[in-house]
Amino acid sequence: MSKTQTQQSIPPSIILVEPQLPENIGMVARAMGNFALTDLRLVAPRQPWPSEAGIKAASGADFVLENITVFARLEEAIADLHYLMATTARQRDMVKPVFSPRNAVREIQTQSQKGARCGILFGRESVGLTNDDIVLADSLITAPVNPAFASLNLAQSVLLMGYEWYTLNNHDGTLGRATAFDGPVREGLDLTHTRPASRRELLLLFEHLESELEASGYFPTPETRPNMVKTIRNIIHRMQPTEQDVRTLRGVIAALSRKRRSRQKLP
């Protein structure tokens, strides 16, 4: 295996053991699609697959549905994998490493970059995985949920793992769906159509604001003026205004000052 191949992070396979409802399979496919997971494996589903109800529940995640494979036994479903993790909400009487979802996907990434094909086991909706299932896994995943109510449904569990995987491997840092109008969304303040205000622009804003405050009698005495000015300037600095913000604020100040002057001219 080449160096390039070993450095790639191959998404894990998602294996559902004896899923009970086709709708849940569809919702799992939908969750996977949101986070670029495509390999869904079903072990002895209770109802035949494919299912019209399950396909409808997938809400268009066809690229996941098209890759679904069905196996009669768990051993067959995991035969080509090199590293396997099992999700569980309960402590098991087995000596296996236990990971949170976030650290689990880091371990999967590490194993994947070594060339291992990885998979994550999810159990039945009603009872989860049995000990016979879990004994086939290399390690366990347990989510830090409310200990008084540790009850995630199948799609939620897959969504949680998918989110952590995608967050770890989404190297460009974009959020959500990129549209032709908006482009990709990134975390933080979007300054695509503006820029931070320059010091000169801020100083002109301060002069404009302070002169109008002076004219309106805002400062009670000359002695209190310096500290009040510092406070106002600090408030505006903490805003980290853009040049558009500054232009808007100066427009507001100008409008208010025109109103004040028009009142002063009245007999």
Image (cartoon, grey):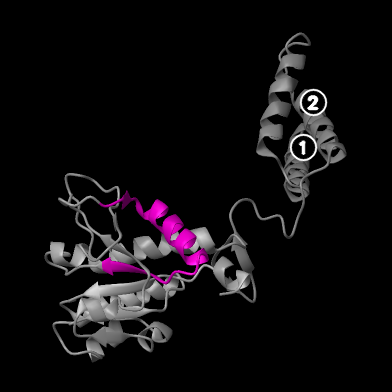
The quarter holding residue 153 reads bottom left
Point 75% across, 27% down: residue? 213
As drawn, which residue projects farthest toward the top? Answer: 223
Give the camera-side residue of 184 and 237: 184
- Residue at label 1? 257
Q: Where is residue 202 in the image (x, y as percent from the top left)?
A: 81, 37
**Disc marking residue 248:** none
Q: Is mark 1 on a helix, strand or loop?
A: helix
Left or right: residue 224 versus residue 36 is right
Q: Please identify the quadrant where the N terminus is shown.
A: bottom right
Specify the quadrant that holds the C terminus: top right
Residue closer to the observer: 255 or 165: 165
Q: Which of 32 and 237 is in front in this view?
A: 32
* Mark 1, other Cα within 10 Å: few <14 / some 14–19 / many ≥20: some
Q: What residue type is labelled 2?
A: Ala
Q: Could you say which quadrant of the image residue 40 lies in?
A: bottom left
x, y percent for residue 6: 55, 68
- Residue under numbered circle 2: 215
Which amino acid, by three-letter code, is at mark 1? Answer: Ser
Task: From the top left corner, tell me how far across and down residue 85 is, in percent.
Answer: 31, 62
In the rendered structure, the answer to whether residue 230 lies left or right of residue 179 reads right
Q: Distance between the residues labelled 1 and 2?
A: 9 Å
In the rendered structure, which segment of residues is drawn in magenta? 96-121
Assign a secondary structure to mark 2.
helix
Q: Residues within 10 Å of mark 2 (few under 14, many from 20)?
A: few
Q: Which of 130 and 217 is in front in this view?
A: 130
Query: Residue placed at 38% from the left, 70% from the top?
Result: 82
Task: Give yes or no for residue 252 being in the magenta stretch.
Answer: no
Relative to 77, residue 247 above or below: above
Q: In which quarter of the image is residue 266?
A: top right
Q: Do the residues labelled 1 and 2 touch (CB within 8 Å)?
A: yes
